[in-house]
Amino acid sequence: MSDAERDAVAQALARARAAGADAADAVLAASDSLETRVRGEEIDFVVQARQRTLGLRGLVRGSRGTRSAITSTSDLSPEAIDRMADETVALARATAEDPAAGLPDGGFADLRGAEDLGLGAAEDRSVSVEARIEDARAAEAAARARDPRIANSEGSQAASEFRRVVYGNSLGFLGSYESAMHSLACEPIARENGSMQRDSWFSVARRLAALEEPAAVGRRAAERALRRLGARSVPTCEVPVLFDPITAASLLGQLAGCASGYAVYRKTSFLAGRLGEEVASPLLSAIDDGRRPGGLGTRPFDGEGLPTRRNVLLERGRLTSWLLDSYSARKLGLASTGNAARGAGSAPSVGATNLWIEPGARTQDEILADTPKGLLVTELIGMGFNPVTGDYSRGAAGLWIENGEIVHPVEEVTIAGNLGQMLRDVDAVGSDLLWLGRIASPTLRVARMTVAGR
Amino acid sequence: MSEPGSLTFFRERFDVDERSLARILDGALERKIDYADLYFEYATQDSVALEEGIVKSGDRHVEQGVGVRAQAGERQGYAHTDEIDLESLRLAMANARAIAQHAAQGSARAALPRRADAGPNLYPVASSPTDVPVARKIDLLGAIDARARARDPRIVQVMASCVAEHRRVLVVGSDGTFAGDERPLVRLNVQVVAEGSGGRREIAYQGMGGRYDFAQLEQPSAWQPLVDEAVRIACLNLDSVPCPAGAMTVVLGPGWPGILLHEAVGHGLEGDFNRKKTSAFADRLGQRVAADGVTVIDDGTIPTRRGSLNVDDEGTPTQRTVLIENGVLRGYLQDRLNARLMGMAPTGNGRRESYAHLPMPRMTNTFMLAGEDDPEEILRGVDRGLYAVSFGGGQVDITSGKFVFSANEAYRIENGRLGAPVKGATLIGNGPDVLLRVTRIGNDLRLDRGVGTCGKDGQSVPVGVGLPTLRIEELTVGGTEG
């Protein structure tokens, strides 16, 4: 991080105070990135980018609460920052007083002798466009070499991004950190008897060396597309539904949204009012840990400067914590859990850091063998989830199971139920916890759901 | 518009002028480059949001940047930066050019700037919506909150927001393309939670917007029906019963259910997927893809619509494009790159979320023309099925053609009559054949209220859809009741 970036944050804070703010905080997010896609043997695109955005929150105290406004700019000239700070305070004065608004009351992260959270490797900084093009080429070539039925693709994409975040507030906290993220994805298309199926596989990590081998990414992507050939719908029925680790993680993501302090105090979550209750199968424990080394959601402090930490959301099915920032915590009479998320261009909100479901003892194959009839879901599409009621209905693709074995691929079906009931109906948890993002899960089996098809 | 208004803005603000831009582009063409362009953008956005009866916060954002692109064959080099000055531009162009340098063809010289031949401004406004005093927006949200709560005592939560945007763009291309545009956009969102007996809660959302003056949203005739509709749907859903599951006849109401077109055929007709032959519609021009009477249009030239543009994000004037004519596939949505590679003409559908993204073929406003059937008669003709009038989002797999969209106001149809409202359900179908199973087309084409946002490759752009009442046979409904 450059002194100029710290100076921009300091200038925004000072100017906001001078313009009449009683408190303020500012965040500067900067990134350098490169991204490329190779399709077949040809480079599709290469994108190189540099971006910096400064965000400011101005707070003006009144007799019944605090007024606030958020502004951001990608114009970081001193004049633009001054203008932004003045506008922020003027805008804040137009809003209503809110007793819960304000900076955290204290307890900011201690940055002395900070531990190494594994947010990146110094040697990766010099990664070249050519090297990432080669990664994409290798994945693409491996996918196409895997089987003659892989004759086309949407391409293989490699990306590297280096981010810097500076956060400061008028209570004297000023912290910063750097992080990196590298990814490689491959999306081949399999063709047989005039019908086409696509699927994908990808790898993502804080260090280049931690990425899966490009050829392995390509092969796996090809195998996933190939196994979908000949997919068909099934008659409408009620059966056990297995979610593979990727689709199971999407259920956990929806659960996290419903455990967000904002959804809870607004009562727009089916979990509102149920803290401490058994809301899920005793097989389910879910943990959010913002300090997991090398995690994609890891950071030394959250969007309000509070230390990140480990929170248990579900303990053997019992709902033990919400995800909170200081605003939603005040609304609920609780303390922040260090889950404030703050982009430079947005107000603080709540987000999971590294959230996962604790793995069980059985492999996916073992759970499958123990399923007389059902659907293994490998892809979900659409947004059919209602957080207020938990009602769930999404398009699905996957593999049909008869007598413990996969018999054919499935498409053009929906699966429907209610997330609350689905969580209670989980009767098997796999050992195959898989990290491909900030939210991760092993295979989960839900005892009964409606599969709608032909 | 393609008046020098945008150029004047960027020249004064960033000290860039026509001659130096032409020099940068000319430098690009010294290598084997087919085309190069510069995309300047300066956007202001503000929003205020109300919940628990008060506007707790307001926000305002300024985003600026420039994207520099070089094309050679199928290859594109792109560099973007939020620092708009000639030095950054030269550096970015050098990067973009290097990326494309190994390609074989191309050797054009940069042409003299040529202003795009766009028609009259589709969205003139008296004042930029971001210049409207915030107090007026706060007042509007307060009135919305009061009306929603007064409308029905079961409303326990009202969340409303008002978003205004003013975006200036300038496109300068190596073939002489020179087009600017000023794009106002406003949007009003109303979300209410109703609580019924036994603590059952339901949520409903309604929104509206377009490229017009904020004052238009302040008209009671605009926002009051919106609030009433949100309240009605939330309260209605308090009595909703589980949705049936399985394949059945579905009648779609007019307007917003047009997202069916967007998911079922819209994405599949984008030029890039068809050039790469990854779409289920590839190589099917001239073939029957829909029932007789089905005509689908993409039209970026409808005044004040959310999906409309004077020129697309590559400087091509927008147009009305026939995609499907009386059931037969007639055209694709094209940007410059894919049009060139397919030997077709660009259709003004080259769009991008911002300067930080490469343009791609995207829809503007996509809708189906009206048929001749009376909507009420269409419903009366159905023995057993689902009538869906309001939808949330959708998604499509363009390769397999499978698409979904989620209903949030729907009813059972029994013996030609509407039954109980049913809980939200996802409908799933197959893009290449769903329109073949259209059996009745209403005479009531309606465009949506201006809330559509389409996502592709991580890029979101504002769009519009429209549909007349439509009867479709054998669509799979993803409910829970057998």
Image (cartoon, rainbow, N blue to C red):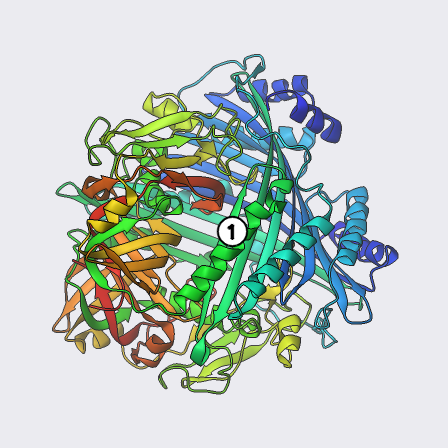
Instruction: Locate the N terminus of chain B and report the quarter of the image it occupies.
Output: top right
Seen in the picture, residue B432 relative to B229 is either above or below; the reply is: above
Label 1, residues with CA under 10 Å away: few <14, some 14-19, many ≥20 = few
Label 1: chain letter: B
Q: Nearer the viewer, residue B108 or A370?
A: A370
Query: What residue is rendered at 22% in x and 42% in y?
Result: B438
Residue A156 at x, y percent in the picture: 37, 45
Query: What residue is rendered at 51% in x and 38% in y?
Result: B306
Residue under pointer 1: B225
Q: How many marks?
A: 1
- Is any atom of residue A135 visible in this view? no
Seen in the picture, residue B12 relative to A301 is either above or below; the reply is: above
Question: Is label 1 in a helix, a strand or a loop?
Answer: helix
Residue B160 at x, y percent in the picture: 58, 57
Q: Which residue occupies the extreme right position in the image?
A: A18
Q: Amino acid at mark 1?
A: Pro
- Is any atom of residue A129 visible in this view? yes
Query: What residue is rendered at 40% in x and 20% in y?
Result: B105
Q: Nearer the viewer, residue B105 or B200?
A: B200
A346 displayed left or right of A271: right
